[in-house]
Amino acid sequence: MSATLPFHRRPGTRLALRYLLALVLTVIFVFPVYWLFIISFKTPDEIFAFPPVWYPKSLQLANYHVLFKDGDAATVGNSLILASVSTFFAMILGTIAAYSLVRFRTGGENLAVWIISQRMMPPVAIVFPIFLVYVWLGWVDTYVGLIVLYTAFSLPYVIWMMRGYIEDIPLELEESALVDGCTRAQVLWKVVFPMARTGLFATAVFTFVFAWNDFLFALVLTRTEVTTYTVQVTHYFGGQSNFWAKIAAMSVLGTIPVFFTVAVMQRYLVRGISMGAVKG
């Protein structure tokens, strides 16, 4: 029967075409990552060679050595501190706020919509007023300043996401804990947090990535002490020439923490997204 079907409609052919399409898309998306890593190990001659050198003759660690020697790699540590601490505070405060919205109807039915609408505000519209306030407070180029800012900008997203996860937790479980003598804080710690664990991890990953990738606020509100890696990369672009080896090496260093964070949290990430997407 299959012999009478056109070639492109045969089951084996359709499956092969799907695999071929998947392979092509994989190559398209993976190649830029591969090229970034390879450039970070190339010599200047190999970087500018034509035709392109697809892989270096020997791995050059000098590009990374220069970053650590000059102290530029410390900016990755700054980004890690800022993103991690701000994510921690945003998750704690945002989850408590979301619990209040769900269980106590704080602010009525429209407060949650107003909160998430704050994420729609373009950062460039408020970065200058924030800069003036930070100058007055003495928070420019400090960890405290950026942690407070990242936490504040992450809260709307955390509250909105955790609100959906907490709504899925049966109210009877909390009532049973209260009857057993738990305080409201204990209910939050012993019942809500464990039940919404996958949602917590999924939201935390995205919150971390948002803070990690920030450029505008870090550019305006830092100078030398708390420079993040996203700002440091721009220092390698010049009017006359660009230091592509440093750009690639710094980009690789900036990619590794996010890669490991997503890899470690992948199980919770997939389950958390699925739990938040499926209702009823």
Image (cartoon, rainbow, N blue to C red):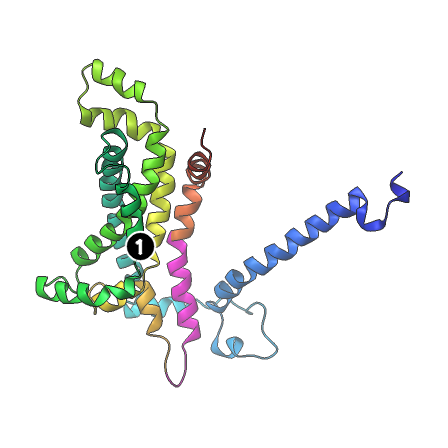
Find residue 279 and report its horizontal and vertical position in percent.
Answer: 45, 32
Residue holding disc 1: 211
Where 192 falls versus 22 (above or below)?
above
| 164 or 88: nearer the viewer | 164
Find residue 31 and report its horizontal and vertical position in percent.
Answer: 56, 62
Kind of residue at badge 1:
Ala
Quadrant of res 194: top left
Where 245 falls versus 175 (above or below)?
below
Q: Which residue lies at the image location 37% right of the left edge and 52% below the top edge?
A: 257
Find residue 113 and report its horizontal and vertical position in percent.
Answer: 31, 44
Residue 199 visible to an observer of this rendering: yes
Left or right: 6 in relation to 228: right
Q: Residue furthest top?
A: 180
Left or right: 181 in relation to 76: left
Q: Which residues are magenta?
A: 239-257
Dominant SS type (magenta):
helix
